[in-house]
Image (tube, rainbow, N blue to C red):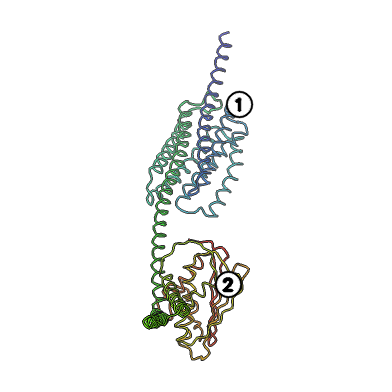
């Protein structure tokens, strides 16, 4: 009766012991699984930095190994020849350790294709090798082999982490190093415990409690290393976010400085484009002002002589009004070039805009004896910034005039065409000058690139900037001895780009 009670008591003790060991494995599996899902959801919400797939894969494989091993402990009968699920569990542990080591290596350098092939081959070798040991080996041999492999993996991790910490110090990597050192300590402890055992272990109740403690402790340290990796990745995400914020602020500041520079260049270009015309426009103003002066003197004379009749009075006043409007139109045209305008879109009649530009350029056109040819289709309207487009067209007309100044061709002419196109509208300004040198053509739209001795090299660059900001395009065709044609393509409704 006493023997029966002892057997029953011993059976209960063994069952409780197996259940307790299984619970340890399940608890660690749940902790690691919680870490995985927490990181996975955070992973999906981040765009700046992604966690390493080596680490994520190692973590999920480790979880699978813990669950399989914990379930196997409950049903195990003979430790000397356990079931096949122990081969599965230990294969998972091997792959997890290998992936964790590869993660540490990836911190310093890209994992080479040869390393990946070697790692894959080692897994294929490990599985049948451990299966052979499961069938023909002992508990001690399997434990020593797994502890040895784990120790090699931990040493590899410590080495790679030491290299990384030299270039990028991190407390989280230090914690992982400490956890790896602890894993080595417990792995070596398992060696020593097995060597100190005086008998062969074949049943669960024969396993020394100190060996179970060291095994669980090693797995706990392994879990802590995964947590350290997760903390390291979170730390890198914070750093990346801070750097991104700093870069955004720097980029915003640079964009503001760029806009300020472009605004300054626009003003400088306006001065350069219209400065040469100021004297001619002043001369042009003398004509309506001179005519107004003569009409006023005539009117005063008739008034003093008492010979002013209503018909003559109306004629003189109409003439004065026409001369005044003509002078005001010339002044308005010149002032509009210098006026700072915001990027406001208005409906622009391109034919009317060309007339306004030619009003400014007309004195120089007459002085150079240039024939103007205008060919515009009807209803050429676009929605854009009128002031900036006026500056583009004035630049191109001035360039055409300058090209004709130096030519020996007696038939000087500028042809301006406006027509509808598939993309919107297209304006071309063609001169009969000597053309552009082929070596210069590649740099025509570059900033500070000019072929004029008095030029600033910003005119065509700004033309391109303005046109592209309106969602259009600008290009040219030039043939030596035959002249140059500039083309400007614009959408019907401008889409401003920064």
Q: Residues within 10 Å of mark 2 (few under 14, many from 20)?
A: many
Q: Is residue 488 left or right of residue 457?
A: right
Q: Are marks 2 and 1 in contact (CB under 8 Å)?
A: no
Which numbered disc, 2 or 1, marks the residue that appears first in the sequence? 1
Residue closest to the eye, 197 or 146: 146
Which quarter shows the N terminus?
top right
Q: Dot 1 corresponds to which residue?
A: 75
Q: Position of residue 93 (x, y in %)?
A: 54, 38
* Residue drawn 48% across the image and 85% down it: 404
Q: Position of residue 297 (x, y in %)?
A: 37, 82
Q: Is residue 471 above or below residue 406?
A: above
Task: Provide the secondary structure element on which disc 2 rests.
Answer: strand
Q: Position of residue 91 (x, y in %)?
A: 57, 39
Q: Dot 2 corresponds to which residue?
A: 426
* Residue drawn 56% across the image and 9% down it: 2
Q: Residues within 10 Å of mark 1 (few under 14, many from 20)?
A: few
* Residue drawn 38% across the image and 52% down it: 167
Task: Provide the secondary structure element on which disc 1 rests.
Answer: helix
Q: Position of residue 273 (x, y in %)?
A: 42, 76
Q: Quadrant of residue 264?
A: bottom left
Query: Looking at the image, is mark 2 or mark 1 nearer the viewer?
Result: 2
């Amino acid at each position: 009766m006493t023997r029966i009670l002892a057997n029953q008591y011993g059976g209960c003790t063994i069952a409780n012991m197996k259940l307790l060991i299984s619970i340890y494995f399940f608890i660690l599996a749940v902790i690691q699984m919680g870490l995985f899902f927490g990181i996975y959801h955070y992973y999906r919400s981040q765009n700046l930095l992604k966690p390493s797939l080596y680490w994520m894969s190692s973590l999920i494989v480790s979880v699978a190994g813990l669950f399989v091993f914990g379930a196997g402990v409950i049903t195990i009968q003979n430790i000397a020849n356990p079931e096949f699920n122990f081969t599965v569990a230990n294969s998972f542990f091997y792959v997890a350790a290998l992936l964790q080591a590869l993660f540490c290596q990836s911190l310093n350098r890209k994992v080479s294709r040869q390393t990946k092939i070697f790692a894959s081959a080692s897994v294929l070798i490990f599985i049948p090798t451990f299966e052979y040991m499961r069938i023909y080996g002992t508990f001690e041999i399997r434990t020593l082999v797994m502890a040895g492999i784990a120790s090699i993996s931990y040493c590899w991790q410590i080495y790679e982490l030491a290299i990384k910490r030299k270039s990028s110090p991190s407390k989280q990597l230090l914690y992982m190093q400490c956890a790896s050192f602890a894993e080595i300590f417990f792995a070596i402890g398992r060696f020593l415990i097995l060597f100190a055992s005086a008998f062969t272990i074949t049943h669960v109740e024969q396993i020394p409690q100190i060996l179970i403690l060291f095994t669980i402790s090693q797995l706990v340290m392994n879990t802590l290393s995964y947590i350290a990796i997760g903390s390291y990745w979170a730390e890198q995400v914070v750093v990346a976010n801070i750097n991104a914020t700093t870069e955004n602020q720097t980029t915003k500041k640079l964009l503001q400085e760029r806009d300020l520079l472009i605004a300054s260049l626009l003003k400088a270009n306006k001065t350069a484009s219209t400065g040469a015309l100021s004297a001619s426009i002043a001369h042009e103003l003398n004509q309506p002002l001179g005519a107004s002066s003569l009409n006023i003197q005539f009117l005063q004379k008739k008034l003093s002589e008492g010979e002013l009749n209503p018909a003559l009075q109306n004629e003189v006043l109409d003439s004065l009004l026409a001369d005044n409007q003509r002078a005001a139109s010339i002044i308005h045209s010149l002032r509009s070039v210098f006026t700072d305008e915001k990027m406001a879109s208005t409906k622009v009649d391109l034919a009317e805009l060309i007339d306004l530009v030619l009003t400014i350029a007309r004195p120089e056109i007459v002085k150079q004896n240039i024939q103007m040819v205008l060919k515009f289709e009807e209803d050429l309207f676009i929605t854009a910034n009128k002031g900036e487009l006026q500056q583009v067209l004035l630049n191109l007309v001035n360039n055409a005039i300058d090209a004709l100044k130096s030519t020996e061709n007696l038939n000087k002419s500028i042809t301006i065409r406006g027509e509808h196109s598939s993309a919107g509208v297209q304006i071309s300004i063609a001169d009969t000058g000597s053309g552009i040198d082929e070596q210069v053509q590649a740099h025509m739209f570059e900033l500070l690139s000019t072929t004029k001795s008095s030029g600033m090299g910003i005119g065509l660059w700004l033309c391109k900037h303005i046109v592209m900001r309106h969602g259009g395009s600008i290009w040219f065709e030039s043939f030596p001895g035959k002249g140059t044609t500039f083309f400007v393509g614009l959408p019907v409704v401008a889409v401003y780009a920064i």
